[in-house]
Structures are given as C-alpha cells and as structure tokens.
Image (spheres, rainbow, N blue to C red):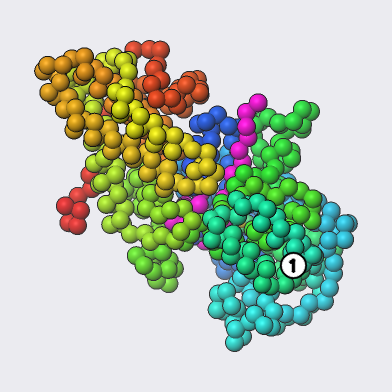
C-alpha cells in the first residue's frame, strides 16, 4: 500500500490580495507535495481561504456587498495566483463551505458535551482588527501589544474552551516529540512561553449582536464561533469532504476520505501564527482526543529591500508582476535557494536577477545547451547507453543521496537539498572542463561516448531532482534529453529510475532546444 502524505498551508484571509508571503508558504507546500508524489506517495495537499470574522464583514460592508459576495470575489485572486505559480494543490477549502461549517459545529458540540467548553462572564480588552482579547497586564498604554492599535474594554458573557488544563500535557508532548514544532528555535520559543506563563482558557465565541459573520455555536444561537476556532478546524474538516476520489480510503471499509487522512504530515505556516497552531490547535485536538499533526513548521518572514512589507509603504511584492517578468520557475527557485527555510529573508529584484544569471542561466542552462550542442555535433543527437565514469559517479551519488535524504525532506531543508543538486550541476560542468569532449572527438571516441553518457545521465538526474522546485523546467529538460514525460516515466520506472545509471528501454535522440533561462541583462548584472 502506498504511504500517504498530507500537507497544508494556512488558509489565507480573503480581505487582502495575495502577495509574496502567501506565495512563499504555498510554494513550499507544493514542493513537498510534488516531491512526495514523485517518490510514489499518495499525496493530499490543501490550501484555502479563511472567510469569517469581523475584518471580512467590515471590508464587505465598505464595498456594499454581503460578506459571502465579497469572499467569492476575493477567493478568485488566490485561486488564479496558485494556477499561475504552478501550485498543484489537491483541494481548496473555504471556511464558508457547508461541509466545513458542519464539522466545526460537530466538534464544538462534542467539546461542549464533554465539559471542555463553559460559559463565563468575561471582561477584558478587545482588539477589533486582531479579533482577540488581551488582559489588563498585556495591554500597552491602551494599545494592542501585537498591532499597536487601540483596544476597547468589553464585558460580556462568552464561551471558553478550557485550554489551561492542557498546559502540562502540551509541554510534555513537545518535549517528547522533537520534530513536532520546527525549526528548533520556534520549538524553544513555544516551550519557553509555555513554561514561563500560565496558560489561560480560550474565549471561543463572539456574541451575535457584535459579529454575525461566523458559524453559530450549535448549543447557543446567540453566539458565533471565534474565527480561529473555525479556521484551524479546516485542516481536519477537509479530510472529511475534500479528499478526491483518486485518494481512496486507506482503511478497509472506509467511506472515502474520512479520518484516514488525519493527522497531517506538515502544517506549513509563517512565524506570525505559531501560537494559534502550536498552542490553540494542539490543545483543541487533545481535548477532542484526536491525534496531533506530525509537524508544524513555522517559516521566517520576508522583508522587501530591508523594509517590512506594507500597503502604506507601497512595497508589497505582487507575485504576478515578478513571474511575468522573470518566470515562475525562477521565482520558485529563488525563494528556496536564497534563504534557509525557517529564517527571515529579504527580497530584492537584484538578488533574484543574480540568482537567475548565475545558478540558472550560467550553471544549469548553459550546461544543458552545451551538452545538447555537443551531442548533435558528435553523434547526431544519439546517446549510447554506456556507463558513467566511476569517479564522477561516486562524487555525484553522494549529492544525489543528500538531495533525496528523508531527514532533509522531513525537516524541510530546501536550501540544503538545492545545494546538493547544484553540487551535481557543478561537478558535471567540471567534468566537461576536465575531459574536453571536443578533444576526445578527435582521438578517443570510446571515452567520448562514456563522457557524453555520464553528462546525459547526470542531467537526467538533475531534471527529476529540480522537478519539485521548478516543474516546467524539469519537464523541458527531460524532453530535451530525449526522454518522454517526466512524471509518467518516473511513475512507470520506479524505483530504479532514481538510481544513477538507470537506462530507458528506448533509443535516446536529443535535439537542441530553447535555452532554459536566458540571461537577464541589467546595468548591475553586466
Ligand atoms: O493568518 N513573509 O491568514 P493571513 C512570509 N487566516 N510569509 C508571509 C508573509 C511574509 N512577509 N506575510 C504573510 C492568517 N505570510 C489566518 C490563518 S490558518 C488556520 C489561518 C504568509 O492571510 C505566512 O504563511 O494573514 C503567514 O502565516 C500567512 O501568510 C498569514 O496569512
């Protein structure tokens, strides 16, 4: 039976248009999804939108629309962008889906019946834009400690999830499971927070008179659900109704979808929403007696030329603009090569151009075109399946193993994986410089054949290794190397296709194609 792999992105608020930050997390999830499909796992990759709450209600009001009409329009921005960025998500969840709402209500009822939710009078400071309460101690001079905007004092009845009783269990869980929260700095941050503070209970309702755009509490219609309780449940509810038919139930007699896809392998999020995931979601699952996800990975923050991205600064990076100018694959590659996943990064067009010109145009693109030109010149494109040069093979196989290392993938070390792939690229360039095929063509045809096969084989390996990061580049490489469709061939040729000297059963004839990454000429790059 195939191993399953389930990866999620945050569900994004519909009150904003997507920018580079949203693209970053979603591309990361796509890289994992594509890689896991490549190695023959049954993959479910999920993204979606978070559509309830005050912010959406207000934004819709401002535009003279109902919240749902507003959301319907905004969702298109996300769906279109994911298509443009070659995101291969299996499903798109919206918190306004009826099925999702039903699951949220079911879970709320279960918690309520089990005495995990209680009604209390609450008095505290409320930050409307952030939709959260703060205690007297937390408020800084009448302002929200998180966003710095004024808070208002509110006293009202509300429902509370008894989160505090899970504090010790959560600490133990995180300590016992070192890769539950990654990277390690974030894990330590959560542990530090849990050990040095007393966890409160979580207010999970909003009175309907103040907020109507939400899921009603099943046990009290005067209240709607706090937006985070509704949003976090998406990861679980999706497994109940969005697993496509191509993903059959894994257990015998399953109903399709169902609990079989829970728990997720990775929740990818930005560091901004670590507490809601690591603390709220984890304790909610404990109270529901459901397994916890295998990993929550909180990545770093992108700034733009050293500044925080903000509408008021006018520096929000529009992914459409970047990919129109530089191409989707270059953008996808840049984001994961430039900065180790987990750390903060700074975006600038110049840094992107530098990466394109060096890693992509020079190292990779030129390698392929030089090889193709030589193959056409010396052998009319026909590549004889011989064997790789031994020393070259030994060096490259080490990097191949690194690029497919389970630990590297389960810890999302994308930059290390890319580094391993580029070791093979560099070593293949070195091989050409060392062997000088143009000289061998004159006096050593036998060696020339081995050298050319070695390069062909290495480029083939590079093609499938870059596939998760740059899917269309990989397919183009694969075809230019005289092979059929990468994804189909990988599936048919498993598992041998990942080994160094795999050979297709058919004759290989290569032909010159378009350069993968034309060099970008700018004043600075010259
Ligand atoms: O928080 N750098 O949605 P959201 C890197 N609806 N990543 C960034 C980024 C930046 N500058 N800006 C945004 C929400 N992101 C909730 C989530 S999940 C159950 C509910 C990415 O639209 C990053 O993944 O504000 C961050 O966590 C997410 O967008 C926040 O998206």
Q: Is residue 445 above or below residue 214?
A: above
Q: Is residue 520 above or below residue 257?
A: below
User: Does residue 501 appear in this view?
Assistant: yes
Direction from residue 523 to residue 484 in the image, left or right: right
State the image coordinates of residue 102 (x, y, percent, origin top left).
Answer: 77, 49
State the image coordinates of residue 307 (x, y, percent, origin top left).
Answer: 39, 69
Q: Residue at x 41, y 20 (%)?
A: 502
Label 1 secondary element: strand
In the depicted view, which residue is nearer to us: 190 or 460? 190
Q: Residue at x 61, y 52 (%)?
A: 178
Direction from residue 120 to residue 233 in the image, left or right: left
Q: Which of the four quarters of the rendered structure image does ligand 1 lie in?
A: bottom right
* Image quadrant occupied by the N terminus: top right
In the depicted view, which residue is nearer to us: 156 or 425? 425
Q: In the rendered structure, does residue 20 fall within the stretch colored magenta?
A: yes
Q: Which residues are magenta?
A: 1-27
The CB of the residue at mark 1 lies under 8 Å from ligand 1: no
């Amino acid at each position: 039976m195939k191993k399953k792999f389930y990866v999620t992105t945050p569900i994004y608020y519909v009150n904003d248009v997507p920018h580079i930050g949203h693209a970053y997390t979603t591309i990361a999830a796509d890289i994992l999804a594509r890689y896991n499909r490549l190695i023959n796992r049954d993959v479910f990759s999920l993204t979606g939108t978070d559509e309830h709450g005050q912010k959406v209600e207000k934004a819709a009001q401002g535009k003279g629309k109902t919240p749902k009409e507003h959301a319907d329009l905004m969702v298109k921005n996300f769906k279109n962008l994911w298509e443009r960025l070659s995101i291969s998500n299996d499903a798109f969840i919206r918190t306004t889906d009826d099925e999702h709402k039903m699951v949220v209500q079911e879970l709320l009822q279960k918690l309520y019946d089990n005495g995990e939710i209680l009604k209390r009078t609450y008095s505290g400071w409320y930050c409307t834009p952030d939709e959260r309460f703060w205690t007297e101690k937390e408020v800084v001079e009448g302002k929200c400690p998180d966003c710095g905007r004024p808070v208002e004092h509110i006293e009202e009845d509300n429902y509370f999830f008894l989160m505090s009783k899970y504090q010790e269990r959560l600490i133990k869980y995180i300590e016992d499971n070192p890769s539950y929260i990654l990277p390690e700095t974030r894990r330590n941050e959560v542990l530090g927070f849990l050990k040095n503070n007393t966890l409160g209970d979580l207010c999970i309702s909003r009175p309907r008179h103040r907020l109507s755009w939400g899921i009603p509490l099943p046990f009290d219609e005067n209240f709607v659900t706090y937006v985070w309780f509704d949003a976090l449940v998406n990861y679980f509810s999706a497994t109940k109704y969005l697993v496509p038919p191509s993903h059959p139930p894994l257990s015998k007699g399953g109903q399709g979808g169902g609990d079989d896809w829970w728990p997720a392998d990775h929740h990818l999020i930005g560091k901004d929403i670590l507490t809601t995931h690591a603390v709220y979601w984890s304790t909610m699952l404990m109270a529901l007696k459901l397994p916890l996800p295998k990993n929550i990975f909180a990545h770093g923050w992108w700034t733009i030329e050293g500044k925080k991205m903000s509408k008021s600064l006018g520096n929000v990076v529009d992914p459409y603009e970047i990919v129109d100018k530089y191409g989707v694959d270059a953008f996808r590659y840049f984001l994961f090569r430039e900065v180790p996943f987990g750390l903060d990064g700074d975006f600038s067009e110049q840094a992107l151009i530098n990466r394109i010109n060096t890693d992509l145009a020079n190292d990779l693109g030129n390698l392929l075109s030089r090889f193709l030109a030589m193959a056409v010149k010396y052998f009319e494109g026909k590549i004889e399946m011989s064997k790789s040069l031994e020393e070259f093979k030994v060096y490259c196989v080490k990097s191949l193993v690194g690029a497919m290392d389970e630990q590297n993938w389960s810890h999302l070390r994308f930059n290390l994986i890319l580094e391993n792939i580029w070791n093979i690229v560099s070593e293949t360039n070195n091989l050409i410089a060392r062997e000088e095929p143009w000289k061998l063509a004159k006096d050593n045809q036998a060696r020339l054949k081995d050298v050319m096969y070695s390069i062909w084989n290495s480029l083939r390996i590079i093609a499938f290794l870059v596939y998760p990061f740059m899917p269309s580049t990989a397919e183009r490489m694969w075809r230019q190397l005289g092979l059929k469709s990468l994804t189909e061939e990988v599936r048919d040729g498993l598992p041998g296709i990942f080994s160094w000297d795999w050979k297709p059963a058919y004759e290989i004839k290569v032909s010159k194609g378009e350069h993968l990454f034309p060099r970008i000429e700018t004043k600075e790059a010259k």
